[in-house]
Image (cartoon, rainbow, N blue to C red):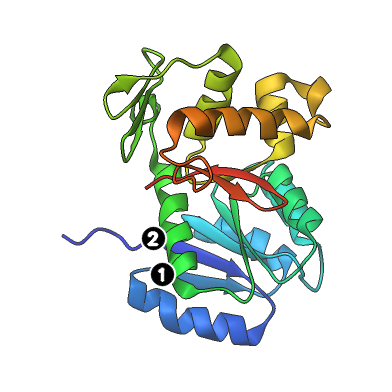
Amino acid sequence: MNAPRPRVLLIEDEPQIRRFLRTVLPTEGFDLHEAESGRQGLVEIGVRRPDVVILDLGLPDMNGVDVVRELRDWSQVPVIVLSARADERDKIAALDAGADDYVTKPFAMGELLARLRVALRHAERTPDGAERFEAGHLSVDLRTRRVTLSGREIHLTPIEYRLLTTLVKHAGRVLTHRQLLKEVWGPSHVEDSHYVRIYIAQLRRKLEDDPTQPRHLLTEAGVGYRLAAE
């Protein structure tokens, strides 16, 4: 018996984008459903129970950030923001509200498909499955608190370890500076973004072959950081 196809709900008011994704996503193994407004999208999420949501920020009836906020009151379905807005503050607001990822228009279809696969894997992860993270030569065992690189144990300070494990628990997702500061340093430090930059640089020196060309700890310019999931 074939596995069920992942269900994607697209909340988007641009007919060209809907038409394009309506053509491509089914050929890539997804079932696509559509909504043209935020309110319709929230209703469709309740009815369709999609596996992942693709959400435009500029909707005719409400801001996409407000859609995410309302949705997070009752659902943890992964949300990928699809935005043409150039201002990073809009994307940061969406991520802080609970979106899992974002892709900027115009977008490459290969990138969107990769982000969809990461979102689906993240949603399927069980607590047991999250105890160990491996990517390339990097291994993080959350149960034993051991970090190894090519089999060699790496010593991390408590804050470095907390920052790394926060990224591990959300591997593949973009985490904003504010999200990282709140989780690692606490709510009183959400404005101290230089903390994140300093400690990410320290982690790169310990975990990357070339800290200037990182393969694991990736920068999302103006937004935050992502731990590569593959």
Q: Are marks 1 and 2 in contact (CB under 8 Å)?
A: yes
Q: Who's the residue at 69% across and 41% down the image?
A: 73
Q: Which mark is residue 95?
A: none
Residue 48 visible, this angle: yes
Q: Which mark is residue 31?
A: 1
Q: Quadrant of residue 179?
A: top right
Compared with 141, 58 (above or below) is below
Look at the numbered disc 2 and give the secondary structure of its residue: loop
Residue ID for mark 2: 6
Where in the figure is residue 3, as x and y percent of width and height? 24, 58
Where in the figure is residue 59, as x and y percent of width and height? 76, 70
| Residue 33 relative to residue 93: left or right | left
Given residues 153 and 173, the one toward you in this image is 153
- The local crowd at label 2, few if under 14, some if 14 to 19, many if 20 or more residues have their Cα within 10 Å, is some
Where in the figure is residue 72, as x and y percent of width and height? 67, 43
Q: Who's the residue at 58% across and 27% down the image?
A: 202
